[in-house]
Amino acid sequence: MHDSITLVLSGEAGQGLQTVEEFLVEALTQETYVFSSKEVMSRVRGGNNSVEIRVSNHPVFALRYTIDYLFLFNDHAVDRLRPRLTDKTVIIGEANFLAASDLNGHTTKAVPFIDMAKQAGNRLYENTAMFGYIAGLLSVNTANAKALITKRFAKRGEAVVDGNLAAFDLGYAVGSADPDKPNLVMPKDFTRKPIMTGNEALSIGALAGGVNYVAAYPMSPGTTLMTLLEDQSRDFGVLVEHAEDEIAALNMVIGAWYAGARALTTTSGGGFALMTEAVSLAGITESPAVIHIAQRPGPATGLPTRTEQGDLNLALYAGHGEFPRVIFAPARIEDGVELMARAFHLADKYQIPAFVLSDQYWLESITQHEPITVPTNYANLNIVKTEEDYLRYKLDPSGISPRGIPGYGKGLVKVDSDEHHEDGTITESFTVRQAMNQKRLNKLNLLKADQLDPIQGGSNRGEDLLISWGSTYGIVKEVVDSHPEKSWTHWHFIQVFPLPKHLESALAKAKSITVIENNATGQLANLIQQTYGIKVTRRINKSTGEPFYVDELETLLEAN
């Protein structure tokens, strides 16, 4: 029987929610299935942040809206989450937190975590006591949990380790003795699954793609990818440049590719808006460029720490003029590794900008995954040794001119942002302009051979199509898998441009097409209609700054 429990931790920034989350996820993932995500306000301290951990006896990759257990870190931690409470929600915290929260009609449990921490030797052990309580509530293996505590605090000395272990034991004793502890049936023959965030997956993919230069200006939620690669700079030979702004960052990336590097920039929508002129520069100079856009709600600063899929149009149409590009949007953790590496490969192979679109929800969620095979065939440079008569923009029917780099051969590698002859010198010839423009656009035909089909699930009938992209994969998949009686066919696009042309006939046969997106206008739905000339029957959109929840999507799909 499939079963799951939703735990939510709620408190201010700086109160240690992330520490409890990491302990719980690392301990639980050794025994059962778990998925965790966070919601944070745009401030260093204060406000109200929350962490949601979903524990299940079957694989889960999405959140539920309703809360089973809510843990309060302060006296105002419940206010923003009140709509998600039900008559079955159990709210747990210090007695004074509960008293101040107007919780009439809800089940509450006063647990003295602060007193436990003091009894263990230091008030700072409060979060470890809470970890112990939740571990006891869920009957987590104590040896695994204590090993995590010891590892985390070993550098702080034996006294700190012992104090935290004592706080854990006090919390565990109370949680395990709770008469209302949940009856979650653990999976049989469970094999431990490794865990990873989307950010970590993209960093591995970039390394697999041969990245050796990163130029970026910090902008959440795209910054973490830069810092993760900086952490690996010595081991993998990656030079990370904190650029003065986003305009400089992408220009640096283009310059690095010109010199023979494999370069990446990472940003969010507002930062990428500043890069659009440089995208056109990559287009006409036929320079590879890999650009990661970590989506968040706009316009302008919008909700800088929340999630949205609002920048597909931005990536698709950025830059003046017409030139080819490819856009990926990872769904599963393994997609993050594969698609980022593939972006480097295709950018280099076709001398085009390659985009990877993620979002805050996908990047920062902690997900279990199957063993990942890191691709090894995407890091080779497609460059030639130049001769004295080298032509950087040699006209070729395929659209691909041989790419040389300075110092490798005898030729002069001349590039220009104006329209140019084959040797790179500026021209205003209309004939040359037409030939060069068409040569660049011909790469779109070549890209068809490298296109990725959508991930397919659900019914194979193809009559009632549910289409999604990017981070919505786990949510839609769970709803589809939970309702086999609906005969839904699920297509999930991980390459959102160009879309595979051969899907047109299957789309034409569908009785209904529903596109599910975390944006207000249905950007993929519009692209599907434009590409295939087929009308989308229904759009399910959400642009609150939250991801879809499984129970929410079930209700929306049932509504007519």
Image: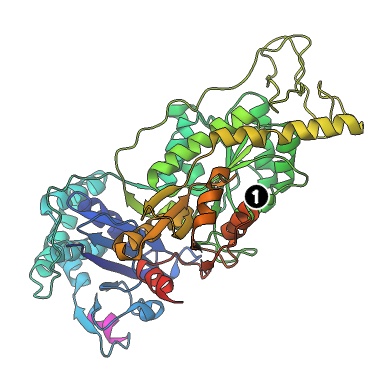
Residue drawn at x 76%, y 21% is 394
Work out whether 58 lies above or below 112.
above
Residue farthest along the bottom direction in this orientation: 104
* Circle 1: element type: helix
Q: Mark 1 = which residue?
A: 316
Residue drawn at x 20%, y 45% is 192
Residue drawn at x 60%, y 28% is 349
Q: Is residue 385 magenta?
A: no
The picture quadrant where one finds residue 179 is bottom left
Q: Where is residue 442 drawn, in percent x and y?
A: 70, 33
Q: Where is residue 245 drawn, in percent x and y?
A: 66, 47
Could you tell whether 402 is left or right of 368 in the image? right
**Is residue 129 visible in the rendered structure shown here?**
yes
Could you tell whether 201 is left or right of 176 in the image? right
- Color theme of the render: rainbow
The amino acid type, in three-letter code, at marker 1 is Leu
Could you tell whether 549 is left or right of 222 in the image? left
Q: Where is residue 57 drawn, in percent x and y?
A: 19, 58
Tell me where the magenta segment starts and ends, as one range: 95-100
Q: Is residue 99 magenta?
A: yes
